[in-house]
Amino acid sequence: MYRTYTCGELRKEHIGTSVTLAGWAQKNRDKGGRLWIDLRDRYGLTQLMFGEGVTKEELLEEARKIGREFVLQAEGIVIERESKNPNIPTGDIEIHVDRLTILNKSEVPPFLIEDETDGGEELRMQYRYLDLRRTPVRKNLQLRHRLLQATRSYLDSEEFIEVETPYLIKSTPEGARDFVVPSRMNAGQFYALPQSPQTFKQLLMVAGFDKYFQVVRCFRDEDLRADRQPEFTQIDCEMAFVNQEDVLQVFEGFAKHVYKELKGIDLEQFPRMTYDDAIRLYGSDKPDLRFGMEFKEINDLTQSNGFVVFDSAELVVGINASGCAEYTRKQLDSLTDFVRKPQIGAKGLIYLKCNVDGTFKSSVDKFFSQEDLKTWAERFDAEPGDLLLILAGETDKTRKALNELRLEMGDQLNLRTEKEGEPIKVAPLWVLDFPLLEWDEETKRYHAMHHPFTSPKSEDIDKMETDPGAVRANAYDLVINGVEAGGGSIRIHDSKLQARMFKLLGFTEEEAKAQFGFLMEAFEYGAPPHGGIALGFDRLCAILSGQESIRDFIAFPKNNRGRDVMINSPSIISTDQLNELGLSLK
Ligand code: ASP
């Protein structure tokens, strides 16, 4: 037996027991006559002790030669520690070692393998197997594992069937670019890796599976950000004979289940908001509801006072930063700089301080009387001591910019995190009634906002040809803490309606047939009404842990240039391989 206990297991009650442990040497402390080694495995750390009166002289010498990350097997007796470490579960004991075997040596690792490391992101990615030895990273993957188990058990209990769908498929139009794979046996032809199993899961509904799920890898060739990876995992689901409400119920139940299982948190019923309201009140279709600061529109109170910025604006809108009236000139200037950043895009920022003495001070005092300013304050339910931050301009842009400013203020005022010792904040909501289509200025065409299989609301179907932009969809997103945790829709299950939709998206009949003939044909053989959802699995891990980046929840992620720096991929392939694939570079 290599070991009789793990490094996380021994407690006071084991004192006097003779044990064998195996693991990695994390740290040595050499005090001359005595030497300690922290032995680590996935279960924890146990302190080994070598020294005078405890171990033989040769053993102490041997222990001195042990470097970081050597793999050891140690036999000895569990002893109560003189100075205990209350921070670790094994902190009451140590092992007085009387036999030591070096199972393997290690090069000096390129960064510290401890909770806090000195390794930069790139280095940690290059030696990911060493990074994964670190407790915080391992804990992330353990959480991922638990989420996977909780997902399967919940969906299984709801009678979902897990079905695997192929990875080598043909392109599904979900809005991103496809990764393609050349086919050797069909020279000049390509598979595409699925952006999602969308069409397959719909076909499973036609096949009568009724409730399907899959924890599935999806591939999208997009520019990367902290919360995106070229390959990522979804909890993909589809249900037949359901309406929107049925899907929301099952997946609200799912989210509650995982918060309870993994975090011990009972969530209340999720609020719901239409897409239009989300945009109007928060300037975003994924509002962070951990804090308020709702938008208030004040066109009626601000226009025709001779202030040209307001008078010429399509929208004058602001937020109330409660308790910030004391902001200094410098702080206000830095907020102005913030909104003026090119990626935010506002021209300027107007403020109104509601002073504690009941007076008002604004950056546009020239144009507005104290009486005028008071009406603004009332619109925002502002109290003395509050600060109103106002933007003006073209509606969409101004809302987007104010969304950024709201989030920035949320950060500055620590409203998006919890204070030490406070319970974690969880603010889920459903965003409903998304528009069916989105106008793309560049291509001068409508795109499906969700995907082309999403069904329009029955009451809006008449407008599909006459006023396409006004058609709303039976589409919904689950948003948690300002992050899109998932989204789905009720689907079109009628081949004629599907054909109308393709036409609206600019497909000719031939193009639609060539790409989606199989689906339209399937709809001719008794397709049940159906709908579903997909939740971002990596993202859900990050949300549950209150972290932004999904990278540390993926065992072997790619960097933001889409590279795996550990295996050095993508890489070139040999001319022989290229030839075989009919891809020779001339
Ligand atoms: N396939 C969709 C997506 O990946 C989700 C869905 O509509 O079920 O976003």
Image (cartoon, helix red, strand yellow):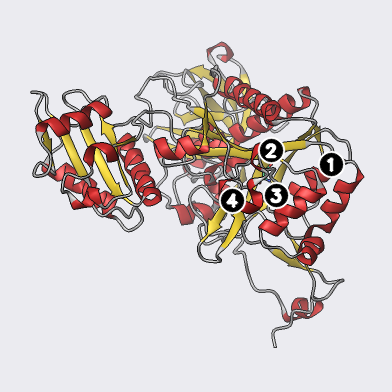
Q: Is residue 216 left or right of residue 483?
A: right
The front one of 216 and 578 is: 216
Residue 247 location, quadrant: top right
Q: Quadrant of ligand 1?
A: top right
Q: Quadrant of the C terminus?
A: bottom right
Tag 2: Cα neighbours inside 10 Å, few (<14), some, or many (≥20)? few
Among the two numbered marks 2 and 4 on one chain, the one whose residue lies closer to the N terminus: 2
Per the image, label 2 sits on a secondary structure element best described as helix
- Residue labelled 1 has its Cβ within 8 Å of some atom of ligand 1: no
Number of residues whose C-alpha sits closer than 10 Å to that of mark 1, classed few (under 14), some (14–19) or many (20 or more): some
Question: Which residue position is annotated with label 2?
Answer: 458
**Residue type, numbered disc 3:** Ser
Q: Which residue is mark 4?
A: 467
Residue pictured at 26% horizontal, 53% vertical: 312
Ligand 1 within 8 angstroms of badge 3 C-beta: yes
Query: Measuring 80% from the left and 51% from the top, which residue is drawn there?
Result: 166
Residue lying at the far bottom in this picture: please name it: 586
Q: Considering only order in the chain, which callout, 2 or 1, is on the residue closer to the N terminus?
A: 1
Q: Position of residue 333 (x, y in %)?
A: 17, 47
- The tag earlier along the polypeptide, 1 or 3, is 3
* Alpha carbon separation for disc pair 1 and 4: 33 Å
Q: Are marks 3 and 4 in contact (CB under 8 Å)?
A: no
Mark 2 or mark 3: whose residue is earlier in sequence:
3
Is residue 380 in view from this perspective? yes
Tell me which label, 1 or 4, sits earlier in the chain.
Answer: 1
What element does badge 3 sit on? loop
Question: Which amino acid does the dot numbered 1 rest on?
Answer: Leu
Closest to the camera, between mark 2 and mark 3, is 2
Residue hosting label 1: 204
Marks 2 & 3, CB-CB < 8 Å contact? no
Residue at 17% across, 36% down: 352
Q: CA distance from mark 3 to mark 4?
A: 30 Å
